[in-house]
Image: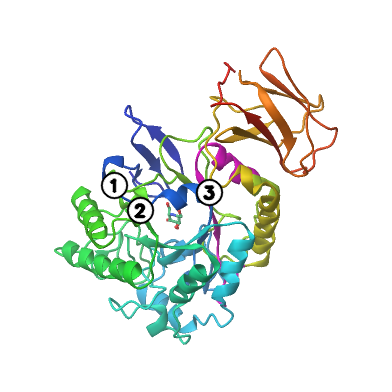
């Protein structure tokens, strides 16, 4: 199956172990197979919030080719703008990110309250953002800058306490081992590629060399695969790659897009499953409507929307991987920084309700917002402060203590018809989302909603 425009569907199998996600123009992203699970998921499950970074040659044209806007995702410009290899490769000579500052990027992520960072080591374009020995088509050898941003980010993450992780595209529009969907000297279409005759094994070796580098030299804690919808990527490729990675480091976390049921967690894209999904999962999302930088895309989501998305993910037991698309000079655009800092400000007050929390115990969405849980505590993230100044919490448990997380203000409670009642002050401490903490004995016993 092959989609022209971004579409997302989630389908559950009978066993609930398999999540199938249909993402932009590719076949499927299969869910995790837990029996093969050896990854160190502890930190990841607690983290809840990470930074996705799409940075590559595509940040040079920034959505414009020969003076015309190319609609769609910035990182797809080679395919969507039908740019021949030679012209695209020449972008490397113009890629000079003199303003890049690894410590600054990590500081922004840290101040946003993010606990990990996933950066494109190689997107579909095939350009490598690290000092790989497997190809010269990389940022150190092929640009006037000659520096290794992944090495600097890995070190900065270690220093500032974030987990450094890398994205890796299986589909490669530059590799000679893969052929474009429609070859043309002047108007090629790359997606989806297929293996050049007899070149599958060579490409697998190429990937293994690079992944070995990412694990042993860059200490990636997680590999975020993508592009597995290229023709010819099959179960035996996925199994071979999976086993190879586990043989080097069994603790590295892998997303499900290695394909065919391998991997540790599911990856809904640009949407949040309303009540979460079984097993570990992470929604990735753009702040505007492109992953890679596009100079003319100003379709920004508000800080309030992004905070609600983060809470929504946590309430469904999932992580939120929020994307930034830095410029070719190495700057994270100001509108993105502004929104990230607003989320960080909210998390400083309310982080207790998000980090290390568990999914909502309730089967349906609550009318006033969301819920997350920890042993002995239920957190209510109120996004719609009720005019009645009363929350009805559909559970049997008696509340031993209730208070506002922002200011410790104690709240009165009572047992009512639909469950436990919590009486609120007239004004919400935070118009975006205010957290109420309920202390309870034992696990939540939900009532029928
Ligand atoms: O095609 C890519 C896209 O450019 C971007 O990298 C996203 C991020 O999840 N993944 C792919 C589409 O599923």
Whichever of labels 3 and 1 marks the residue nearer the N terminus, that label is 3
Disc 2 target residue: 254
- Residue that sits furthest to the left in the current view: 198
Q: Which of label 2 and label 3 is nearer to you?
A: 3
Residue labelled 1 has its Cβ within 8 Å of some atom of ligand 1: no
Q: How far from the left and from the top, in percent, is residue 180?
A: 30, 63
Q: Nearer the viewer, residue 73 or 252?
A: 252
Whichever of labels 1 and 2 marks the residue nearer the N terminus, that label is 2
The circle on residue 276 is none
User: Are discs 2 and 3 less than 8 Å apart at CB?
Assistant: no
Bounds of the magenta segment: 308-332
User: Are discs 1 and 2 less than 8 Å apart at CB?
Assistant: yes
Q: Which of label 3 and label 1 is nearer to you?
A: 3
Q: Residue at x 43, y 75 (%)?
A: 151
Q: Secondary structure at mark 2?
A: strand
Query: In the rendered structure, does residue 316 fall within the stretch colored magenta?
Result: yes
Q: How far from the left and from the top, in percent, is residue 223?
A: 37, 59
Disc 1 target residue: 262
Q: Nearer the viewer, residue 189 or 135?
A: 135
The circle on residue 48 is 3
Q: Residue at x 22, y 50 (%)?
A: 234
Q: Secondary structure at mark 1?
A: loop
């Amino acid at each position: 199956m092959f989609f022209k425009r971004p579409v997302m569907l989630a389908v559950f199998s009978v066993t609930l172990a398999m999540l199938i996600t249909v993402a932009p123009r590719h076949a499927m992203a299969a869910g995790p197979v837990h029996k093969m699970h050896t990854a160190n998921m502890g930190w990841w499950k607690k983290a809840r919030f990470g930074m996705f970074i799409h940075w590559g040659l595509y940040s040079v044209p920034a959505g414009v080719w020969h003076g015309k806007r190319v609609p769609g995702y910035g990182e797809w410009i080679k395919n969507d703008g039908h740019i021949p290899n030679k012209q695209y490769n020449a972008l490397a000579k113009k890629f000079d990110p003199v303003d890049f500052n690894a410590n600054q990027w990590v500081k922004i992520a840290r101040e946003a309250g993010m606990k990990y960072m996933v950066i494109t080591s190689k997107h579909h374009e095939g350009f490598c953002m690290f000092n790989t020995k497997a190809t010269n088509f990389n940022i150190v050898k092929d640009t006037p800058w000659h520096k290794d941003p992944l090495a600097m980010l890995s070190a900065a993450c270690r220093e500032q306490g974030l987990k450094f992780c890398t994205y890796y595209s299986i589909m490669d529009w530059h590799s000679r081992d893969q052929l474009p969907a429609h070859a043309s000297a002047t108007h090629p279409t790359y997606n989806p590629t297929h293996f050049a005759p007899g070149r599958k094994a060579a490409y697998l070796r190429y990937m293994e060399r690079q992944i070995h580098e990412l694990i042993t030299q860059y200490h990636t804690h997680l590999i975020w695969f993508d592009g597995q919808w290229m023709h010819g990527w099959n179960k035996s490729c996925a199994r071979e790659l999976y086993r190879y990675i586990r043989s080097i480091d069994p603790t590295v976390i892998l997303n499900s897009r290695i394909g065919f049921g391998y991997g540790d967690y599911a990856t809904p894209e640009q949407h949040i499953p309303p009540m979460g999904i079984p097993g570990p999962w992470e929604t990735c999302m753009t702040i505007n409507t492109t992953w890679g930088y596009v100079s003319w895309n100003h379709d920004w989501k508000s800080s309030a929307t992004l905070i609600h998305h983060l809470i929504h993910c946590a309430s469904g037991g999932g992580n939120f991987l929020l994307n930034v698309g830095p410029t070719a000079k190495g700057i994270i655009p100001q509108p993105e920084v502004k929104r990230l800092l607003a989320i960080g400000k909210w998390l400083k007050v309310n982080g207790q309700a998000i980090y290390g929390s568990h999914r909502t115990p309730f089967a349906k969405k609550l009318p006033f917002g969301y819920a997350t849980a920890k042993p002995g505590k239920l957190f209510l993230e109120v996004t719609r402060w009720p005019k009645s100044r009363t929350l009805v919490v559909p559970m049997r448990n008696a509340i031993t203590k209730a208070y506002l997380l922002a200011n410790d203000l104690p709240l009165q409670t009572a047992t009512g018809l639909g469950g436990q009642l919590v009486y609120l002050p007239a004004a919400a401490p935070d118009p975006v989302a205010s957290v109420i903490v309920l202390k309870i004995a034992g696990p939540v016993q939900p009532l029928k909603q």
